[in-house]
Image: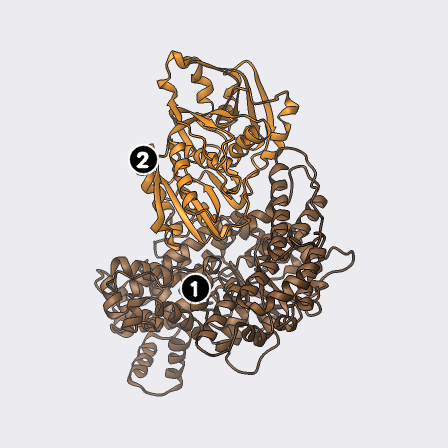
Chain colours: A orange, B brown
Amino acid sequence: MVKSSVYQMSRLTDLQIRDAVQYDCILLGGGSDARAYEVLRKAHEKGVTFIKVLLFDFEERKNASDRKIKDAYNRYTTLHDDITLLPCSLKDPSGSLKAIIGHGFSFNQKSRLAVDISAFTRPYFFSLLKYLQDHCGLLTVDVFYTEPMSYVLPKGLLQSYRASLGPLFVMEVPGFPGFTTGRKKNILVFTLGFDGDLSVFISEEVTPDSVVIVNGFPAYSPKFKDISLMNNERLLNASDAKESISYCRASNPYDLFNFLVVLRKKNPDAFFNIAPLGPKPMALGACMFALADNSIRVVYPMPEKYANVSTDDCWHSWRYVVPLGLSLRTG
Amino acid sequence: MNLEDSYRNPFAEYNANKMDSKTILDYWCDPFAFKKSKAIQSGSFSEFDVLTHEMPLFFVGGRGTGKTMFLKYFSYPVQLEQAKRDVANGTISSIADYFSKKGAIGIYVRVDGPLLRSFKGKSLSQEAWNSIFSHYFELRVCQAVLEVIKDLVLQDALLVKSVEKDFVTQVARCLHVKPGRNVNLDSLIAVVNTDIEAVTRFRSDIVFSDIEFHPRKAFTTGDLFTVVKLVKKHIKGFLSSLIFPILLDEYENFSVDQQRQINTLVKFVPEATTFRIGMRFEGFHTFDTVSKNEFIKTGRDYQEIVFEEVLIKDMDYEKFLLGVAEKRLEAVPIFHKKRFVDIQKILGTRADLETEARELISNRKTPDQHFKLLKDSGINIPLDKAQQLLRCPDNPLLEMLNILWVIRGKPPEQVGQTMADYLAGKKSASVAKYRMDYVDKYKLSLMFLLCSVYRQHKRYHSFNTFCFLSSGIVGNFIELCRRSFQIAYFEDRETLFEKGTIDSRIQDSAAKEASSAELKMVNRIHEYGEVLYRFICNLGNIFRAYHTDVRLKYSETNQFSVDMGTLHDQQLKNAFNAAVEWSLVQKKPRLQSTSPNSPRRVIYTLNRIFSPAFQITYRTRGQFSEEYSEEDMRKLMFEDNVKPQVSLVGAESAGTIQQQLSLEGGSE
């Protein structure tokens, strides 16, 4: 049964003084994008405070050869007095999650936690939220996210966005292997991103019986919807997928969550694979759905490396109240 | 519904993994029906062999060669569908009769890459992961076998008694389930499913805490293959005479440790079964087994069948593609009704190079540009005189041949006369040489040269060209057709539906798109993607330079040799193996000389699907190859703009530099 819950999402700038809240800790990823520490920088202006900061210190990012990028990564040092660094690798969320306790953090059901997903890769924050739900017993967590002002498109709007670089392999997101038992049909749900190579790769690896595509619309910018479609031309044309494109609001994770719940009800016998390539709030919606139904498998392309900077400047920062411990599993 | 409204791209469905049994049967084109002769070479096989031959068979081929389609065709669900069709049309009396005649039931098992890759890391020793994988794989095979038996029982009531009585009891023992009243086939399948779920749960939980794996009962390699033997022994009726080959796909995705376990089964094949394994080139990561000092060897433990070789060497590849296309076209109502089911007619049989050349020259302000090659090559002859002697307005390619002959030292007057004699149908040694140079040797090369002079792209179209471009990979051919039909549907629907043809320009756009897309994907190959991208770009640009050499010294060069034994750098070796695995370069079946009088070597060709991207030939002529040492390979993989080994004079040297495909992935 789905517990009924009215979702809560708000822009950081819209928060009133009555919304002031103190979190025991904020968990955030280190990054060089302008938005990486935006919440940490701005939240106190709205009365949102964090007692501690647990910063996932990515070995792949912290030692950038470009001085500016390295300095941008290290900006966190001036933003809070109590920051604990958790050494980690983009390729292995498991190692750092297992090390959280060893760094003096023991979260439980009563912990008031915030997670800023702006600089986390998708597999990383999926695993992190799963950890908080299954191993810490949290029933809710507040997720922050800062939209980029724009994306880095080195060669124009089309076919040049690369959040990931170089070779890819598709992996199951750690903690989300899914359960196939009794599932007769294999469905692959994509939230569409700009990097069209990724969707084709995943489709070829998972080889689903059918593909469902969800595009972000309305998006931060009207053109993003079309860029996603054009960049994913190969996926759209190589399958029957173009007949099943749906749209969910790009900044609203609950919109995708609800969509997936309905899709699940329509296909109770299907084994669901989700590839959250689209905007992070949509990925968060997919994550909420997979957290509530452990029969869902989440797959994601793991690149050899990620671009150090893939977005420019900051737009809105959002706070989403994410309920954990829901149960949607039907079979 | 209007026929046009019911239209769908006949080539849209491409991946056999995504096809259901009915579609696989509908699209199945029996490769055995296209053998060129009955003189079967070693390595050839029949459909009956595929199912019943006791020795494990590895089907090796590039992406899109049809391995999955092939394996799936022999799997139980597809064969059952065929059996039902045969029963319905009275060809056979029963499903049991069908399988008895086939002599086997194929059990298809696919474990996808993301799942296989999850059996590692997370602070657990690889040894422990290997045991867990072995346990998991046994369960997956057992699950597949039991599901087939369950379905067979539904199809044939005569099986019920012995299945429920003897078979279930024996399987329960094998699975360490206490026999009892409640134990039946369904409950055993549920036990296996639960055991599989336990592995899945462990794979999930190990991410967050260091736990140990405690299965209900641990199975090691070969334990549950016993179930196959039990089928033969304890189910009365037709099943007792069958063999149950395990059809395992995408073997290249299995890690070294995982392959070691499967190799063990291949070496010591369990009773009543055998293996049919689909794999890419260089898909073996190891030949070892789990036993020390034991390894598998081709010929002794298994037979390797190279798909491309079978398709190209033993079969009439063009006829096979015609058959593949016809099945797909027949399935589209509008084409079926109008009998537009011959892809050769839709695309045109062959490209008409003379017409293409004429179109290229026509309506140009300076249609004499190619005569300037003479001056650029140091031939001292006034332009108007050259035109007067060497001109052939109806056929610019003959003009190009004339120019070539003059550049190579023949007097212009003599060349002009030879052309005139040739056109008049006269016979002489000179005319014979002229004809041979034009028809047999250089026509296509001259077309490339002409295109480069006018900085125009060569057009790639026609059934024949698409056959060549596909490089023995059926999937490439389907993709070329898919894109052609897709563009035609948008740009020229009327011609497609009314005349059943697709314009050559549309085909050309499709070929270029397909080629660029393939090239772009090289970058994302999970191992050595960037290195391979550079390697392919360098090769393509080097071969391009041969095509624009005004002397056509080594025209249409698109192959190279490298002695793998001389590659000591493991990274280079691995990267090159990956290039072969992904069919970016293709090994020629026979040794060949790299140039006249040189020793015979292993030759590789650049996959011809890249030809449109680099504007090079779609044929393989094979008279000359570049020879690469380890140092050359390093340059090709790690440096930009590597030059050809032979000194060449580019046709665009007269002031314009031909655009090179950049390592950024497009024309700069």
Q: Residue A11's quadrant in the figure?
A: top left
CB under 8 Å between discs 1 and 2? no
Query: B12 or B230, which lies in front?
Result: B230
Specify the amino acid type for callout 2: Pro
Counting from the top left corner in percent of width and height, residue B402 is at: 34, 73
Residue found at the very far front of the displayed protein: B181
> What chain does badge 1 belong to?
B
Residue found at the very far right of the displayed protein: B293
Which numbered circle lies on residue B335? Answer: none
Counting from the top left corner in percent of width and height, residue B542 is at: 47, 58
Residue behind mark 2: A218
Classify residue B639 as left or right of residue B207: left
Q: Quadrant of the N terminus of chain B?
A: bottom left
In the picture shown, does residue A114 fall above or below B7? above
The local secondary structure at tag 1 comes to helix
Residue behind mark 1: B23
